[in-house]
Image (spheres, rainbow, N blue to C red):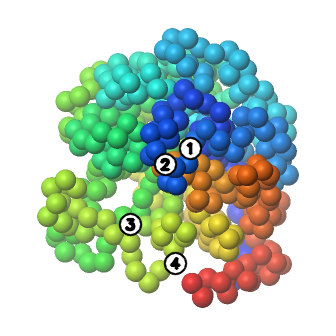
């Protein structure tokens, strides 16, 4: 194993989302979903990592880990608990948190919608409601007006594709009513919501950098049969392309135009936001519910605690595909792995950042990398057992402890890459573990 160093400037940091770490909010739909017993092991979002109370302590950890940038989300339900009534106290608490980051020299990137939303919004049909884009625009305006002196970098919607898959296709996200039509209706409204938010942010902060964060699943197959090729096209179209075309270009692919009006062609992203975790096999199927496609996991590979394949090459393949299409700076807004024993997270970081370094050498402008996540957190319907953190949380005491992989990532940031000594110090045992898996 050989080290590497980044040939171009890249900001390295980590990411979180409000409901996943904050705790204490009862006005968001994930709290209600928890109360309905929909989270693994009967767990609830109400505890989170107690970050709402412990944010100062957490910023000390972020500083200690030498993070250069930090991606966080603001919770819509806290800021607008009742439609049209904004909570200044909550807004000021976010200002305080962001100010502390800035004082520490850490650049904030703020996400406006990261899966969770106010209960009142869900009860009016959420993104199925044709007024949802304008409702989201009003929330955006309030937040941006209140943070305009602090925040330049924004992500409007996190993973619209995963959000809709959970909400409208699989039903593991609230409110649990599945419908293929709602998937496309929701996609249309999310696209319009993103575009309105994009314009609003630029109106208030002309020099802002605004984008959407897409979950890029690397779709692959074992054969090249016609049926497989068609299945792959269908999956890529419905999971990636409708969002790319819509949110980057204002182009509504069929059938989105049936559900949403008033979207014009234009340029609506200032960077390519990509979240990458794994590769997914695709084959054709007879099931109409899945539009004649089936997803599987490749055998004889390496897997994380949730059984997702670890496939670093998918990150570079995805970035190349999107970069040559849009020619915008790339921000890897999430990449990480659940590894409760911290046995292979260091190697995961090494392998993925080595892909990044190869792309930088090729001249692809990857400006940022955010590790998911700075700390263990509430992994939606799966609850607290998946451990994604550079920092371990003991949920009984809320004690935080930096993992060895966290120390490794800190040294990568300090050294602008990985030295041979770091490989000896952090990765030797991991490589042996990896072979035994
Ligand atoms: O925890 C999630 C995050 O909220 C969105 N992207 C994927 C992560 C890991 O599943």
Q: Nearer the viewer, residue 53 or 197?
A: 53
Contact flag, marks 2 and 3 (Cβ < 8 Å)? no
Q: Residue at 63% of width from left, 16% of height from top?
A: 87
Q: Nearer the viewer, residue 249 or 33?
A: 33
Mark in front: 2 vs 3: 2
Placement of the N terminus among the 4 image quadrants: bottom right
- Where does label 3 land, which residue? 280
- Where does label 4 land, which residue? 302
Q: Give the mark, 2 or 1, whose residue is nearer the N terminus.
A: 2
> In the picture, residue 146 is in which quadrant?
top right
Res. 195 visible in picture:
no
Mark 4 crowdedness (10 Å alpha carbons): few <14, some 14-19, many ≥20: some
- Where does label 2 land, which residue? 39
For numbered disc 4, what is the local secondary structure?
Answer: loop
Q: On the rendered structure, is 259 left or right of 83? A: left
Mark 3 crowdedness (10 Å alpha carbons): few <14, some 14-19, many ≥20: some
Mark in front: 1 vs 4: 1
Q: Which mark is residue 203?
A: none
Contact flag, marks 4 and 2 (Cβ < 8 Å)? no
Mark in front: 4 vs 2: 2
Q: Give the mark, 4 or 2, whose residue is nearer the N terminus.
A: 2
Mark pair 1, 4: CA separation: 31 Å
């Amino acid at each position: 194993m050989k080290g590497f160093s980044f040939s171009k400037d890249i900001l390295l940091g980590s990411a979180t989302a409000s409901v996943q770490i904050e705790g204490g909010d009862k006005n968001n739909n994930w709290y209600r979903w928890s109360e309905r017993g929909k989270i693994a092991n009967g767990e609830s979002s109400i505890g989170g990592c107690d970050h709402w109370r412990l944010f100062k302590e957490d910023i000390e950890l972020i500083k200690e880990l030498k993070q250069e940038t930090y991606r966080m989300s603001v919770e819509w339900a806290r800021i607008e608990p009742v439609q049209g009534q904004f909570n200044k106290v909550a807004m000021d608490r976010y200002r305080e948190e962001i100010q502390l980051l800035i004082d520490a020299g850490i650049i904030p990137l703020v996400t406006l919608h990261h899966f969770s939303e106010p209960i009142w919004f869900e009860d009016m049909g959420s993104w199925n409601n044709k007024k949802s884009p304008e409702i989201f625009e009003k929330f955006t305006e309030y937040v941006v007006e209140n943070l305009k002196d602090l925040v330049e970098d924004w992500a409007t919607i996190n993973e619209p594709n995963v959000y809709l898959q959970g909400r409208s296709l699989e039903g593991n996200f609230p409110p649990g009513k599945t419908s293929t039509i709602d998937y496309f209706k929701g996609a249309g409204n999310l696209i319009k919501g993103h575009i309105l938010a994009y314009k609003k942010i630029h109106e208030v902060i002309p020099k802002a950098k605004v984008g959407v964060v897409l979950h890029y699943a690397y779709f692959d197959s074992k054969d090249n049969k016609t049926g497989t090729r068609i299945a792959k096209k269908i999956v890529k179209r419905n999971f990636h392309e409708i969002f790319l075309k819509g949110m980057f270009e204002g182009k509504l692919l069929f059938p989105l135009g049936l559900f949403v009006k008033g979207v014009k062609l234009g340029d609506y992203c200032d960077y390519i936001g990509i979240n990458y975790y794994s590769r997914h096999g695709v084959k054709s199927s007879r099931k109409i519910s899945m539009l004649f496609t089936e997803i599987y996991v490749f055998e004889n590979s390496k897997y994380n605690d949730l059984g997702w394949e670890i496939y670093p090459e998918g990150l570079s393949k995805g970035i190349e595909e999107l970069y040559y299409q849009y020619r915008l700076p790339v921000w890897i807004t999430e990449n990480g792995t659940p590894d409760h024993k911290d046995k292979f997270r260091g190697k995961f970081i090494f392998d993925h950042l080595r892909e990044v370094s190869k792309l930088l050498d090729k001249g692809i402008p990857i400006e940022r990398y955010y590790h998911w996540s700075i700390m263990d957190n509430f992994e939606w319907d799966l609850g607290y057992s998946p451990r994604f953190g550079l920092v371990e949380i003991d949920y009984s005491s809320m004690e935080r402890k930096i993992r060895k992989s966290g120390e490794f990532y800190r040294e990568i940031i300090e050294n602008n890459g990985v030295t041979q000594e770091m490989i000896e110090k952090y990765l030797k045992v991991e490589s042996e573990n990896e072979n035994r898996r």
